[in-house]
């Protein structure tokens, strides 16, 4: 691939553009705060999305990238950062659960939490998402923050993800009627209470961290020439966990695919081959999709601000470096995006909505999704190596 030097700014020259991007995000928040009824929620979504984008970009919080670091170099720092985010989110979520739902009685779930059904459909969605990540080179949230870095392959991957969502909608009624309508929705506090659920999750996360630390091989730190050093992975993880808890408390669980799926559903809804009714979809928690009737939604504001935050951070750090991708990379981005879109639709979210928000909420679906995604990310990485990509 070829770097486009005209679009590459050294950090000292990019401070003013970065400040201007931040000003645009703040202006957007101010404008959306005036929307009747939901203005505060939209404005807060912008602020949280911008902060999330900054953290993702500066800490390289990409599920595929940190997994690849471990597979190739036994560098576990990125995966340890994800575990740190899950630990902070677990503790924060459980504190909020006590306020939202004091007694975790069977049959009742905390409002809005991403607690989904567990079935072979979830496994299939996670497998598709893991392979799609490996094929495209990033997860959906990382493709969004890489838009801010000037990636020219990420728009193609996101376009593919939109097409994958349409395929997911087309297959949804069959999957729902054959499996999902009777699949159990399993929430750990129902069986263990809040204290037991939080203790079990922290213990499991601690055990995974110990296992990764034992296999970690120290690597070099610091930034490339002309770029500011990245943040330590655990710092990014702690901040992601904090943002996730704040988002759930004030707006809703973190997720980045609801708006993408809604755009795909809206675009396809007028076609005669598209199902007029998606059975039971609105009964599940997760990155819900709707036919859009208004310009702005909370998730849409969050995603737009995520890209703006990542752009500001990339400009400031010298990471805004658009490159011309080759035909092969574009094809892999498109195909990987389709796999991720289908997987995210049938699994009701991606590595942010189903994995991060699901595990933090003590949903068994989040743990199953995470385990399967990790396994198939490894498989996809192996296939990439064999193919010489």
Image (cartoon, rainbow, N blue to C red):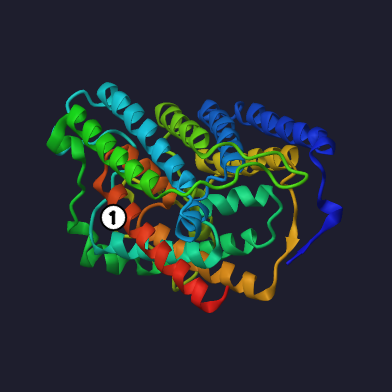
From the top left corner, tell me how far across and down residue 19 is, in percent: 76, 31
The answer to whether 171 is drawn above or below residue 294 in the figure is below
Q: Quadrant of the C terminus?
A: bottom right
Q: Quadrant of residue 342?
A: bottom left
Tell me the residue at 24%/47% (across/down). 364
Q: Residue furthest bottom?
A: 387
Q: Quadrant of residue 103?
A: top left
Residue at mark 1: 280
The answer to whether 305 is drawn above or below residue 144 in the figure is above
Q: Nearer the viewer, residue 3 or 45?
A: 3
Q: How many marks?
A: 1
From the top left corner, tell me how far across and down residue 347 is, in percent: 35, 57
Q: SS for tag 1?
A: loop
Q: Quadrant of residue 206?
A: top left
Tell me the residue at 40%/52% (across/down). 349
Does residue 260 appear in this view? no
The answer to whether 225 is drawn above or below residue 381 in the figure is above
Q: Nearer the viewer, residue 195 or 185?
A: 195
Q: Is residue 272 left or right of residue 359?
A: right
Category of crowding for the residue at label 1, using alpha-carbon neighbours closer than 10 angstroms: few (below 14), some (14–19), many (at least 20): few
Q: Quadrant of the N terminus?
A: bottom right
Tell me the residue at 61%/42% (across/down). 221
From the top left corner, tell me how far across and down residue 296 is, in percent: 57, 41
């Amino acid at each position: 691939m070829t770097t486009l030097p005209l679009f590459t700014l050294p950090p000292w020259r990019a401070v003013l553009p970065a400040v201007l991007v931040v000003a645009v995000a703040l202006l957007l928040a101010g404008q959306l705060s005036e929307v009747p009824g939901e203005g505060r929620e939209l404005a807060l979504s912008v602020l949280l999305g911008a902060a999330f984008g900054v953290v993702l970009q500066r800490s390289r919080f990409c599920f595929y990238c940190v997994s690849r670091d471990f597979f190739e170099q036994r560098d576990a720092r990125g995966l340890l950062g994800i575990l740190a985010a899950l630990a902070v989110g677990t503790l924060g979520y459980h504190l909020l659960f006590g306020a939202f739902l004091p007694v975790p009685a069977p049959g009742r779930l905390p409002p809005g939490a991403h607690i989904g059904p567990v079935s072979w459909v979830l496994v299939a969605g996670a497998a598709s998402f893991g392979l799609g990540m490996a094929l495209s080179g990033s997860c959906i949230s990382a493709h969004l923050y890489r838009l801010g870095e000037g990636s020219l392959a990420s728009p193609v991957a996101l376009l593919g993800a939109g097409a994958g969502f349409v395929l997911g909608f087309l297959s949804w009624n069959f999957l729902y009627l054959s499996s999902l309508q009777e699949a159990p929705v399993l929430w750990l506090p129902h069986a263990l209470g809040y204290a037991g659920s939080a203790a079990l999750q922290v213990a499991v996360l601690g055990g995974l961290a110990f296992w990764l630390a034992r296999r970690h091989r120290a690597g070099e730190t610091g930034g490339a020439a002309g770029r500011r050093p990245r943040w330590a992975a655990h710092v990014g993880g702690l901040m992601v966990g904090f943002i996730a808890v704040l988002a759930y408390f004030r707006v809703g669980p973190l997720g980045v695919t609801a708006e993408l799926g809604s755009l795909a559903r809206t675009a396809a809804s007028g076609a005669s081959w598209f199902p007029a009714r998606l059975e039971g979809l609105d009964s599940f928690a997760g990155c819900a999709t709707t036919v859009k009737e208004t310009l702005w939604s909370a998730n849409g504001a969050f995603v737009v601000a995520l890209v703006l935050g990542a752009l500001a951070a990339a400009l400031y750090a010298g990471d805004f470096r658009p490159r011309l991708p080759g035909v092969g990379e574009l094809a892999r981005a498109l195909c990987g995006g389709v796999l991720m879109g289908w997987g995210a639709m049938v699994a009701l979210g991606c590595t942010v909505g189903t994995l991060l928000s699901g595990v933090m909420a003590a949903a068994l679906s989040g743990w199953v999704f995470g385990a399967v995604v990790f396994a198939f990310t490894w498989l996809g990485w192996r296939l990439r190596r064999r193919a010489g990509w």
